[in-house]
Amino acid sequence: MFTVAPARTLAPATHRSPRNGVSIALFGLGHVGSAVAGLALEPPRAARWPFRITGALVRDVHRPRPTGNAVARTSAGDSLLDPAPDVIVEALGGLEPARTLVLKAIERRIPVVTANKSLLAVHGDEVFAAAAATGTPLRYEAAVLAGVPFLGTFARRRIAASFPSFCGVVNGTTNFILTEMAASRSYSEALADAQRRGFAEPDPSNDVLGIDAAQKLAILIRHFAQCSVRADAIEATGIAGLWARDLHHAAAFGGAIKPVVAAAWDGVEVTAFAGPAFVPSSHALARIDGVQNAILLRGAPGGDLLFAGPGAGPLPTAATILDDVVEAIEDVETRTMDGGIPDVRAARPEAPVTGWFIRLTGAALAAGPDISGLLGAHGVRLRRASEEEVHDGRTAQWLTAYPCERRRLETALCALGAATGCDAFCVRELT
Amino acid sequence: MFTVAPARTLAPATHRSPRNGVSIALFGLGHVGSAVAGLALEPPRAARWPFRITGALVRDVHRPRPTGNAVARTSAGDSLLDPAPDVIVEALGGLEPARTLVLKAIERRIPVVTANKSLLAVHGDEVFAAAAATGTPLRYEAAVLAGVPFLGTFARRRIAASFPSFCGVVNGTTNFILTEMAASRSYSEALADAQRRGFAEPDPSNDVLGIDAAQKLAILIRHFAQCSVRADAIEATGIAGLWARDLHHAAAFGGAIKPVVAAAWDGVEVTAFAGPAFVPSSHALARIDGVQNAILLRGAPGGDLLFAGPGAGPLPTAATILDDVVEAIEDVETRTMDGGIPDVRAARPEAPVTGWFIRLTGAALAAGPDISGLLGAHGVRLRRASEEEVHDGRTAQWLTAYPCERRRLETALCALGAATGCDAFCVRELT
């Protein structure tokens, strides 16, 4: 009927009342690190305590920084752990040296705040176990929906958190690109615009291939389903294969194509996917446009909940990190932000059964082969079909199909290709 | 540059580790109280601790209840405070005996969880002062957007909370009615339907007159602007004067009419209003339909944030109350949920300067008087105008006007009425 949290070894409840300000060691002084330093040095009036940056770990101490000389720089990370600051903020990104430094801080029971998706997705088991074993606060509110506080809220509120599924738009870069493509711009035009505006990296692979989304999804699954899944075991698809016409036909079918993540779980199985999906216009995520991010928590005792706001950007991320710093210090119980629940179990994420949005292209399409019959013979039932269009000398047609497994769809499309010579591109439907 | 929270007199940090379950005295066993009891007796597996109801205060101990005999009933509230339960849940609603019992519990340093909007709006100064003076947790997450956790989140996260304005849809009953009216149903049909479905009380005055919304607005202003305002000093208008045609023309003007609350503040002044408003379709609140509630927090360091979900209903409210119970017990620092900020100042809520949505009716309208000129002479500039329509023998026309003070608009409409004999009905525009 209920789970009683078992007693854990806790660090002594040395609640710090930081009269001289909260001392922060800052690992990394890039876009996010500099924004953290800037906001820490001039926080909003409402901030509960003053902040003090004890120093920042950088690769090149001589490179000029936006923070000037207000923040002492060092290339020796260990020096920032001794004497121990109140909190370390890890804003390096990537796996190393972030992992080693975070583990060292946890070993010394120095609370850690990080926004590092890769670290938590790849080394989550190790890092969370270390935090739990030492009773060290580990907070990561900015790792997903960077500007929107919700992870910590649900860690504290276990009844609200007892929902069985969620879906979300957690990557602003691809949401911006698909929003632009819905206005008839090509993928490459939209990507170039995103890069010009600073929404996409010069190498956009992590975003457009769905890697960033899959890592955030793995973090969300750990947080809400108490399951440890490998990010690279989640079905993740990129957006590079999409045409502006796909977005057009999605709209004609009464929806939009959005870069989503989705997961559902019961005691046995976790299903999950990350990638572009057809989202009916009645769905709350259909209206999350541009760089906005959102998460829809479904089936909670209180009903479905939507949280939306900025998912990235130095200032939103820095504001969230500094609020995490204060929460890490105030949490006398030094719970890690996953609610201290120790029974995270490993799980293999299964691909869900969903409807599909399909684009067929091929010379033979114009001759009107019995697509419905050919797919139906393999158990794939079509729902809607567009008129045919000619693009670059090839006929194209858009379809939607009723829910089926990916394998069944792929077998059917393979057989269709063999019979008619047409190519297929498909994305899932989010319901 | 920053505010250091002054030391306060705190109760001894007697952190309870409730191995035998959290004991709850329940004041009130109506819809919400019964749902709290039901959920407490069979909580979701994820609940951190078991709950135990020590008894429930009811007016009539003999009336049968949905909880049967699982909850002991008494008509003597004081008996539930001695021996002291871990927490009291106040689900009586209304001012008395809720106020007296809550103050008694606070005096005995028993944490209080309440969803009572009237109590907090009318007696907030007294109740919060008592909680602060004794260091007793007082939580009210379910008082606004009952099923959506956000108040406690921002009490803990002061940087995210440093925004200067918000707006929201905080009354599900009127949102349901206006959503139905947008589908061409009359006000009375929509109200009757809301009553049939249990969304509206037999006496719907509190909702349809805007009293409930103004009380929630006063609670939000205290929470976010640290200002104590009287709910009955806030400009609040009801929805009973609206026609289905108003909703139709709002849609034709590219928006919707929604029952909103809005507030903005700086160091000097608080502006606020509650009532139906024209909301452009690009606004996040324009798409909050039916009984859904939402709040849009604007201008935070992280950017605008939207939180949406169920705003009422026994189960969402009960789930939020029980999560508050756990948070109240875990908060060793026994901060009240307003963040313990003692410098709440009294303020008079001013009416804001906004655009307007106007319906004119009158026999003379068909003759085409120079409405634009007559209003313009009083400094009211029109933006859009509909075609004229005839309803019940009277001509009607819909207009929107650029932002101006209510007094200016009313003077102009009064002069127009004197010149042409036409009547005016207007609601604010939310931007």
Image (cartoon, coloured by chain):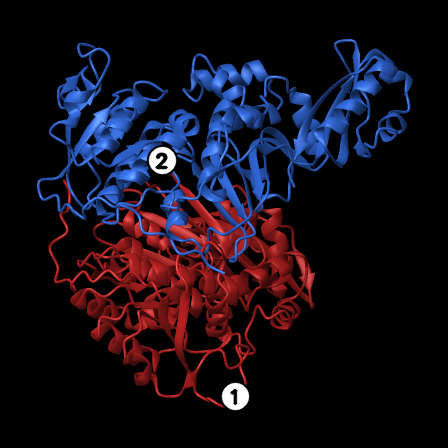
Chain colours: A blue, B red
Look at label 2 and name its amino acid.
Phe
**Where residue A292 sits in the image (x, y, percent)?**
47, 34
- Image side of residue B179 versus residue B124, left or right: right
Could you tell me if residue B431 is visible in this image? Answer: no
Question: In front here: B99 or B231?
Answer: B99
| Residue B352, numbered label | none
Query: Of all residues shown, which one is farthest toward the left?
Result: A20
Chain holding disc 2: A
Q: Which residue does the image show at 33% across and 81% down from the upper left? A: B80
Front position among marks 2 and 1: 2
**Residue at horizontal 35%, vertical 37%?**
B302
Residue A420 versus residue B139 in the image, above or below: above
Secondary structure found at label 2: helix
Residue B409 position in % (x across, y down): 42, 58
User: Circle 1 marks a residue in which chain?
Assistant: B
Taking depth in this image into account, of B170 and A215 the one nearest to the observer is A215
Question: What residue is disc 1 on?
Answer: B63
**Three-letter amino acid code of the residue under disc 1:** Arg
For the residue labelled by badge 1, is the local secondary structure a helix, a strand or a loop?
loop
Instruction: Tell me, yes or no, whether dots 2 and 1 are on the same chain.
Output: no
- Residue B232: percent from left, percent from top: 35, 70
Q: In this view, does B194 lie to the left or right of B145?
A: right
For disc 1, the neighbor class at 10 Å (few under 14, some 14 to 19, many from 20) is few
Whether B130 is drawn above or below A138: the answer is below
Q: Residue at 35%, 57% (x, y): give it.
A: B272
Residue count near mark 2 (Cα–Cα under 10 Å), binned few <14, some 14–19, many ≥20: many
Q: Nearer the viewer, residue A222 or B124?
A: A222
Above or below for A81 versus B264 = above
* Residue B413 locus on image (x, y percent): 47, 61
- Name the residue that disc number 2 marks: A128
In the rendered structure, the answer to whether residue A253 lies left or right of residue B223 reads: right
